[in-house]
Image (spheres, rainbow, N blue to C red):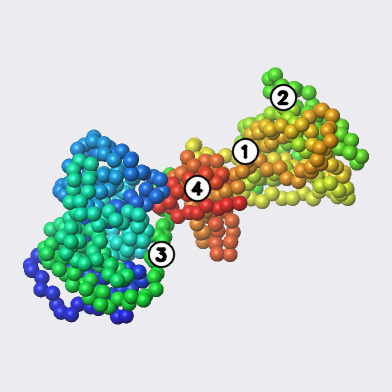
Amino acid sequence: MGVLAACAARPEPAGAAPFAAFVIDAKSGEVLYEDNATARLHPASLTKMLTLYIAFDALERGEISLDTMVTVTPHAASQPPSRLGLKSGQKIAMRYLLRAAAIKSANDAATAIGEAISGSEEKFAARMNRTAKALGMTGSTFKNANGLTAKGHLSTARDMTILGRHLFYDFPQYYNLFSRRSTDAGLAEVANTNRRFLDAYKGADGIKTGFTNAAGFNLTASAERDGVRLIGTVFGGTSTANRNAKMAELLDLGFKRANPRAAEQPPAAPNYEPVPDEALVAEVEAMGENVSAPAKTLRVAIAPATSQRPKGRPGKVTEPLPFAVADASGAIEADPQATAAAVDAMQDGIAGALAEAGVGEATAPVTEVAALPVETVAEVEVAAAPEVVEAVPAETVVAAAEPVVAEPVMAEPVAAEALPFALVDPNTLEEVAPVVVAEAPAQPQPAQIIHTVTPAEPEVTGDVVLMAANTMEPQAQETEVVTRISTSGGRHWGVNIGRFDSQSTAERALMKTMLSESSTLSESLRKIVSKSGGYDANFMGLTQDQADLACRRLQARGTQCFTIGP
């Protein structure tokens, strides 16, 4: 279907605002009419449609609620008419501010909404621009939440029509707000500035008017007839009556041209780009090479001689741990020497790795060991041979021996892979050494099946779970074999913040995001995964609730993300 253009030149009085118009089929997105539709003009109070779109989005994300009490700032209270009449220091529920902005087009209410969501009107304007870009409003820039004339605060008839369509599709539960002829705004009953058009045009059910001297009389309207819905925008009307008449003429024309059998094609979901706060970007860039420098490779060869065994907690058993060891016949006996050697190797491995990393004396917390009952334990064998310590960026896993007799094979030294990026404490912004775990070389493993003995809840200390067997006589219970022990505690979820062209770009994005959302991501592990199309930047090691909350908060800041499940 062709696009209808203006048929004749429009006579414009001296000093009149430029005219522009755009009409589409809301269901299919087909353009039915356009005239000067991409000219950047003053949108006036049509701006409040975007303020309300962001507010509805914030409601859905849980940033605010309809019952959130907003304290009115002096800046919001000082806005010129149209006004609800807010006073500085006054508290008012968010629901009333939304009604006042949508129905009465109150400038003070719109400013209060923006400040409540983003902290200041300047920050809210930045969010407006990010949202406009995500919606495809390519000709718009915003400076305030209410649409009062400001240098650079411009939009187009096309963009406002796109925004009106997104309001209808993205937030149908709130769209009815625009069709109310009047409503309770808390301080007063307010009338709809668009009530004349709503009453006069058949099928009209929204959405927003606007007027300033610079803009003229503007209107974005929607109407439905016989299953066909149109959305149109008019800029530059010379009066309310002129604007309404022009809109009625264009919608009539659109209904004649629209295809009632057109397939529905809802608008695409907003494509938000991750944009960290400028202050955070500057802070990260000031770190220089700590962010972009290659990660260190830790390889520590250790041949431990003797080591002081860790002391037990006060009041607890300090004798060697009675780890259960099974021989081929199934008998269980204690092997304190093997237990002590395993603990020694672990402590020396951590100390050596930290020393090579330049940390000095080992500052990592020492794992305290106490006698703990377990359901099943595997035999531990340690030889005083050279050991290899690998940096472990993901969860620590202790694997038990398989229940078969392995052929004696000496372990080959394996070089540790470089960490994908430097680890930085989000509180001090100083580089810290990773926690490493010493592993004994592979040794011949005897066949073993350990009977379950009096189970109890394991005790977790630091990053490693150590389990010991109860010294009670085994009872006839079902046989179990441990094949994997995880210390993640169910933290198998993560958050992906995008795919990037290079590893360094992904590293920088992870660091910036961590700084901006450290409250929910402080317990996560930053992980970069190389894919065929680039480098995925992920935060891993979270619970499902932590991942969901972090992603919601990031999206509220304009950072695109999605959660990753196990």
Q: Which mark is residue 548?
A: 4
Q: Give, as a three-letter code, the residue at label 2.
A: Lys
Q: Secondary structure at mark 1?
A: loop
Q: Amino acid at mark 3?
A: Ala
Judge the density around disc 3: few (<14), some (14-19), many (≥20) Cα neighbours within 10 Å.
few
Q: Which residue is mark 2?
A: 311
Q: Quadrant of residue 137?
A: bottom left
Question: Which mark is first along the chain, 1 or 2?
Answer: 2
Distance (Cα) linking label 1 and label 4? 37 Å
* Dot placed on the residue nearer the N-terminal end, 3 or 4: 3
Residue 545: give x, y in percent of width and height.
52, 44
Circle number at residue 268: 3
How many residues crowd mark 2 within 10 Å: few (<14), some (14–19), many (20+)? Answer: some
**Most distant residue in the top direction:** 315
Q: From the viewer's perspective, is the residue at label 3 or at label 1 nearer? A: 3
Q: CA distance from mark 2 to mark 3?
A: 61 Å
> In the rendering, at what x and y percent does residue 81 appear?
15, 48
Q: Amino acid at mark 1?
A: Gly
Q: Quick one: which residue is furthest to the front in this view?
A: 226
**Mark linked to residue 358:** 1
In contact (CB < 8 Å): disc 2 and disc 3: no
Side of 170 where 455 appears, left or right: right
Q: Is residue 359 above or below residue 268?
A: above
Question: Residue lying furthest right in this view?
Answer: 329
Residue 257 in the image: x percent, y percent? 27, 78
